[in-house]
Image: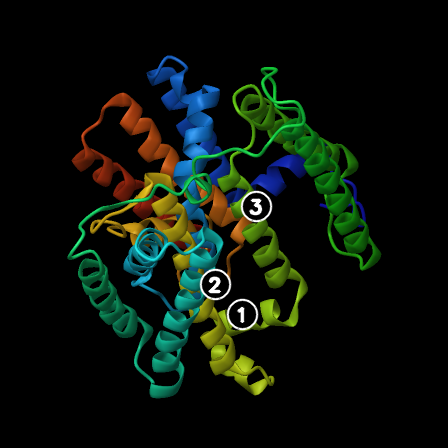
Amino acid sequence: MGETKQKVSLGQEIVTMAKTNIRDYMMYIALVCIMIFFAIQTNGGFLQARNIANLINQAGYVAVMAIGMTLILIISHIDLSVGYVAGFCGAIAAILMTKYNVNEWVAILVVLVLGLLIGLYQGLLVTRVGVPAFVTTLAGMFIFRGLLNLSLQETGTIIIPNKGFNALSNGFIPDIAPGEGFHKVTMLIAVIMVIAMIYTQIKSRKNKVKYNFDVSSAPVFSFKLIALSAVILIVMWILASYQGLPWTAVIVGVVLFIYNYMLNKTKLGRAIYGIGGNAQAAELSGINVKRVTLFAFCSVSVMAALGGVLYTSRLQSATPTAGVGFELDAIASSYIGGVAVSGGVGRVTNTIIGALVIMSLTNGMNLMGIDISYQYVVKGLIFIIAVAFDVRTRKK
């Protein structure tokens, strides 16, 4: 298929690429189809700048939790407690800021450390005591749901007046000259993103050619770069025409960059994939499976705490119902994003697409006024279709 192999027609190459990468492409196709459907059903309202910004803010807490969940699923474990860990950590942040007048950045740091300790506790139960992850985190779901209710028992819902904290999931990055109707910094970031994307893609392709790996032909590769650049520029243009890039997108982008680099460029990342592929073989090859597993549990709990911060900021309040179903959205986002049911396969970049699929469904159905009961049915069907598709394509 690549330039280092025998020549094939452009059409044959495209068909071969589609068949080979059908799992990766399908989620993008699904996202585009969902957006087109809701754009038609809402007379274009779904694709308006205001709603796109709203969608990004809505998806933020699910995206960071799903990134953490991806690591757990890759190593063939699961964490069912992340929803109420997020709700509990959000409540603690609200209590610190309203009752004890703690600075918002200190409060956020405290709850992230709290998330780390929760992950350490659950990870040690799994790796040292030998309690299965399903049982450990199911128990954690009950424990942190109870702690959430206890923490808000006296006050009920806590309204957060802190503007800096609330801006995390409701605010936008500042502009050079605000008030002129177009956000220039957002477009500057878009140009930087496109340049960085093109540079990394070209560098990756050169490395593959150097080691005689298959690569796509120059026309296909160029088309891919043009298409990705166009998507980035169009989305950022839409946001720039409103109020600019939301802070939520910046936070998710930083988290995504860190985790993507860790999984693809470090020994720890290779160890995570190795454990997911075959834990016994990874142990025999010198990987400390228990230590890596402990890291994964600490990681997912820290991301749950960050998700709780973003959700609480989004609502500008802490509520006893925070965390309900969060773990389901995070798990579904990971699987829709291509994490293998059997473990060992998954990418955090695709997980973000999975989160956008889930939240686009929620956002679009809300705009259409569809009852919440039907929304759960639709999301459940999409989830099972995604997993069934994954299983079938892997068999082939």
Determine whether the residue tagged by mark 2 lies in a helix, strand or loop.
Answer: helix
Disc sitting over residue 234 in the figure: none
Contact (CB < 8 A) between labels 2 and 3? no
Residue placed at 61% from the left, 18% from the top?
182
- Mark 2 or mark 1: whose residue is earlier in sequence: 2
Label 2 crowd bin: few (<14), some (14–19), many (20+), radius 10 Å: many
Residue placed at 51% from the left, 35% from the top?
246
Give the amino acid type for the residue marked by disc 3 in the picture.
Gly
Q: Nearer the viewer, residue 139 or 10?
A: 139
Disc sitting over residue 253 in the figure: 3
Nearer the observer: mark 1 or 3; the answer is: 3
Label 3 crowd bin: few (<14), some (14–19), many (20+), radius 10 Å: some
Q: Which residue is mark 2?
A: 71
Q: Nearer the viewer, residue 219 or 240?
A: 240
Determine whether the residue tagged by mark 1 lies in a helix, strand or loop.
Answer: helix
Residue placed at 80% from the left, 60% from the top?
211
Whether residue 5 appears in this view of the structure is no
Residue 50 appears at what percent x and percent y? 44, 22
Disc sitting over residue 272 in the figure: 1
Contact (CB < 8 A) between labels 1 and 3? no
Give the amino acid type for the residue marked by disc 2 in the picture.
Leu
Horizontal relation, residue 299 to residue 190: left or right: left
Give the amino acid type for the residue marked by disc 1 in the picture.
Ile
